[in-house]
Amino acid sequence: MKQDSPRQLGLAQALSAQTGAAFALRNLRLPLGTVPGAGLPAAGDGLLAADMVIAKGRIDWLGPPASRDDLPAGPDMAKAMAWPGTVDCHTHLDKALAWPRSPNADGTFDGAGASAFRDAAAHHGVEDIRRRADFALRTSFAHGTTAIRSHVDSGRHAFEQALATLSELADDWRGRIALQLCPFLGIDEDLDWIRKVAARAGREHAGILSVFVHAIPELDAALDAVMAIAGREGLRLDFHADENLNPASKGLDAIARAVLRNGFDQPVLVGHCCALAVQPRDTLEATLERVAKAGIGIVSLPLCNAYLMDRRGGETPRYRGFAPVHEMRRHGIPVAIASDNVRDAFYAYGDHDIPELFRDAVRMMQLDHPLGDWAAAVTTTAADLMGLPDRGRLDPGAPADLIIFTARNWSEFVSRPLSDRVVLRGGKPIDTTPPDFRDLDDMKGMRI
Ligand SMILES: [Zn+2]
């Protein structure tokens, strides 16, 4: 059982007691970048000070502390940080949590691909996918996430059942987590298959086609073909590109050129972009200029990529493979940060816990000093890149889906595991205990 700290237990009880009536949360700290409206006073690096009123499950009012003398009753939050529900814009729910039966023998990208392929072939039936993905959704919900984008492949033989199963789960979870499903294929697959998957991406799903890009001789022509098909179907595009440390890898640049060449006008999101970290500065700058011009968004997956990139089998990694996110933001490119794989062959660890991911991203990618509005990368910007303008923000009128931490500033936030958080959905505290790992022990092949 998770132990609540006395203070947090008191807070959850105090908030539960408010059910039904309007109540105030006084003296909060809100991360910069999560509050669209201006008018709140700054409270140090990357934080705003605010009082909040919650009524009928929604954020009813936000304003400077002690600026209203008619606030309804409610606790003094003593500078506790309140986040909007987080947004995880790049995951793989069909692969998640298979580690105990299909680990990665050597921790490399190639080892991951081989193990994931074998796992899908051997195990990806309807019930198998449903149980693992539902576990991932319950975990995400307990940690405070309100929206998830998942790529879906499971190999051609299991693709239909993976998509149908996750689609049913998306319906089951509607109202708690907005789950966007993106059928996922390789850029070098045959055009008939790409057309078929594109048609499935549009019909009854989120309208997003997901494409893995790697170096092939006719990459430009292949990207033109994908954009022509996506354009006809009215699909957005989501790419995996440059997930390697080869300076010659130019997937992101090829995508930006293709967007500009084809006049592709639907939103495009590109994940990974690790190779840019080892390219000469002028190459990087030229690529980022094109990416900005093409209106492309980027999602960095730091936990998964720190695990896979520059693995040297017993030697210490020299390069960490993070997308150059600071340089991207300087070019005005929207940047999100997301989970990617969780406890499968591509990443042995993780828990779909976005605040925990953000802590690690701050520490590993030096998002600090100043930290500024980086919290937007896992809230507002991530929601915008998913096309969900009502998620991931503290906005009067929005559902009161909040995560409240005892931390009062970034030093306190990054220093502790954040397991004492209170998650509000529609203004009411939920059970933040994640599901027990033992729930999946009886699945075929799992070895604990
Ligand atoms: Zn991915």
Image: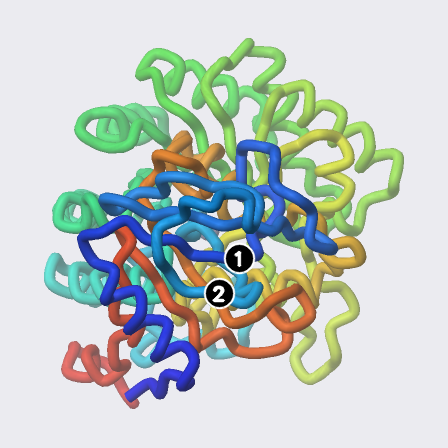
Residue 305, position as x, y percentages in the image: 59, 61
Quadrant where the image shows the C terminus = bottom left
Rendered residue at 62%/46% (across/down): 32
> In whole angstroms, how far apart are the C-alphas of marks 2 and 1?
6 Å
Residue marked by disc 1: 28
Quadrant where the image shows the N terminus = bottom left
Q: Does the rendering let one see residue 166?
A: yes
Where is 238 relative to 440, above or below?
Answer: above
Name the element at disc 2: loop
Name the element at disc 1: strand
Q: Nearer the viewer, residue 335 or 75?
A: 75
Q: Is residue 199 left or right of residue 404?
A: left
Residue 172, position as x, y percentages in the image: 13, 49
Residue 342, position as x, y percentages in the image: 41, 66
Residue marked by disc 2: 77
Rendered residue at 88%/34% (across/down): 282
Where is 33 relative to 129, above or below?
Answer: above
Where is 4 relative to 261, above or below?
Answer: below
Q: Does the rendering let one see residue 197?
A: no
Numbered tag placed on residue 221 in the rendering: none
Q: Are marks 2 and 1 in contact (CB under 8 Å)?
A: yes
Which quadrant of the figure has residue 250? top right
Rendered residue at 59%/19% (across/down): 258
Q: Hey, what amino acid is under mark 1?
A: Leu
Q: Hey, what amino acid is under mark 2?
A: Met
